[in-house]
Image (cartoon, helix red, strand yellow):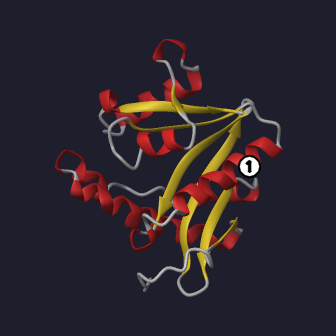
Amino acid sequence: MIEAACHCVAVRIRPARPHEAGALPAIERSAGALFASLPDLAWIAGHELTPAEFYGPLIVAGSVWVAESPDAGLVGFVAAETVLGVLHVWELAVHGAFQQRGLGRRLMTAAVDHARALGLEAVTLTTFRDVAWNAPFYESLGFEIADERTLAHRLSDILRGEVVRGLPGERRCAMRLSL
């Protein structure tokens, strides 16, 4: 059981290890519970989780970082993938008991620093335009909503796939942080 106490300075951000992939869906479930507070999106709190197997190759590639608490173990993660000269963030999740303490920002900083170190041109992601802990959060990190007219085919395909899986397309957007 994860305790709510957080000494976030002591929480370490580090690359994930292959054996930790199985712990990530539970963090995703806890993070997703926040959607229960939004009546029209509450169903997301119980949505199908990303399987642990998805994260394995990303961990091996060195593009998953975890937040590790000395008392509670893994409490957050960001999973990304390098595609066509950019780092695409697939998931950012912080356990509910550790939210609003800067861990999401620290995890995203690790991913952005990694992309810069590789000389990539940008970091991209898809998210909700109008959910406070989605697009507005990423904008605070310097991300910009991608213009739909000039959206890369890869991002358009991801957004279309999200609609097929039930997400409301009119509320979704792609975002980009140019490096």
Indicate the quadrant containing the N terminus: top left, top right, bottom left or bottom right.
bottom left
Q: Report the side of 31 relative to 66 (left or right).
A: left
Q: Position of residue 93 (x, y in %)?
A: 48, 59
- Image quadrant in which you'd find residue 121: top right
Q: Residue at x 53, y 83 (%)?
A: 72
User: What's the amino acid at mark 1?
Assistant: Asp
Q: Report the side of 144 relative to 117 (left or right).
A: left
Residue 64, above or below 135? below
Residue 64, above or below 157? below
Q: Position of residue 84 (x, y in %)?
A: 72, 29
Where is mark 1, residue-wise?
113
Q: Position of residue 161 (x, y in %)?
A: 43, 33
Q: Residue at x 76, y 53 (%)?
A: 61
Indicate the quadrant containing the C terminus: top left, top right, bottom left or bottom right.
top right
Q: How many marks?
A: 1
- Image quadrant in which you'd find residue 163: top left
Q: Residue at x 58, y 31 (%)?
A: 176
Q: Position of residue 175 (x, y in %)?
A: 52, 32
Residue 161, above or below 25? above
